[in-house]
Image (cartoon, rainbow, N blue to C red):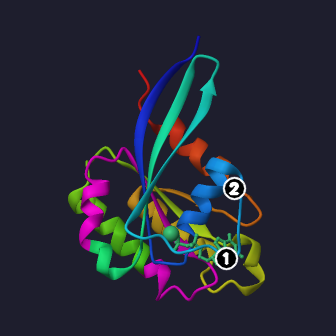
């Protein structure tokens, strides 16, 4: 019999970087080019097996990136065990990557110190139009002690893996 431990995970990042798309790929293995933008926040769950004896249930809060909802974000990340902070690799670093860094700083100030933070450069299927170098994300993540991955919600590349990497960092004893 496997034991399931539940963890709260929050998605943060500029709007249109693909937060909802990453969650939908992970939870339902679906993708749409025409998604309605998230209003407030959406709640979804997904369970993954770490090994024969251990399952991890993610309780996922997919927040809206718009500035007008920003004041709500602490409600979602305050009790979170993990955060996925997303930027768009096809945007210049001054935009969504900088925004991702500001979310990291906010979590470092306000979230539980044990929170597992994963920085994700999304839209890796569009690497031909890349404006933010992978090394930039990698280096920043290393400096700040974050997990890092590039992924594509569209192709699915890296999505399951990033959540598995988070699952392996969570305390299950
Ligand atoms: P959110 O506002 O951060 O939740 O972003 P959405 O998930 O709503 O996605 C914004 C737009 O980017 C939508 O048109 C998606 O179809 C598109 N999108 C999301 N992820 C990807 C991806 O990995 N590759 C590509 N090419 N487009 C994506
Ligand atoms: Mg969304």
Image quarter of residue 34: bottom right
Where 68 falls versus 40 (above or below)?
Answer: below
| In the image, the residue with mark 1 has its CB under 8 Å from the nearest atom of ligand 1 | yes
Residue 142 is tagged as: none
Q: Position of residue 118 (x, y in %)?
A: 48, 56
Q: Quadrant of ligand 1?
A: bottom right
Closer to the eye: label 1 or 2: 1
Q: Residue at x 43, y 32 (%)?
A: 6
Where 38 falls versus 26 (above or below)?
Answer: below
> 17 or 130, which is in the foreground?
17
Q: Residue at x 52, y 38 (%)?
A: 167
Residue 34 is tagged as: 1
Q: Is residue 92 magenta?
A: yes
Q: Which residue is mark 2?
A: 158
Crowding at mark 1 (Cα within 10 Å: few <14, some 14-19, many 20+): few
> 42 or 12, which is in the foreground?
42
Q: Earlier in the sequence, mark 1 or mark 2?
A: 1
Crowding at mark 2 (Cα within 10 Å: few <14, some 14-19, many 20+): some
Left or right, residue 71 beside residue 11: left
Q: How many marks?
A: 2
Left or right, residue 132 beside residue 3: right
Q: Residue at x 42, y 81 (%)?
A: 98
Secondary structure at numbered mark 2: loop
Q: Is residue 106 magenta?
A: no
> 157 or 64, which is in the foreground?
64
Q: Which residues are magenta?
A: 71-98
Q: Position of residue 171 (x, y in %)?
A: 41, 30
């Amino acid at each position: 019999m496997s034991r399931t431990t539940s963890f709260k995970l929050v998605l943060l990042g500029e709007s249109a970087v693909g937060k909802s798309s990453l969650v939908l790929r992970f939870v339902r293995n679906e993708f749409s080019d025409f998604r309605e933008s998230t209003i407030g926040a959406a709640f979804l769950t997904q369970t993954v097996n770490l090994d024969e004896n251990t399952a991890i249930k993610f309780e996922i809060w997919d927040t809206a990136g718009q500035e007008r909802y920003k004041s709500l974000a602490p409600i979602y990340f305050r009790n979170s065990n993990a955060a996925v902070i997303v930027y768009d690799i096809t945007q210049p670093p001054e935009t969504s990557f900088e925004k991702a860094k500001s979310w990291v700083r906010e979590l470092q100030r306000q979230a539980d110190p044990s929170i597992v933070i994963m920085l994700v450069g999304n839209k890796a299927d569009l690497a031909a139009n890349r404006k933010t170098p992978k090394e930039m994300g990698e280096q920043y993540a290393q400096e700040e002690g974050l997990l890092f991955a590039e992924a594509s919600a569209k192709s699915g590349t890296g999505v399951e893996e990033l959540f598995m990497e988070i699952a392996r960092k969570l305390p299950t004893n």
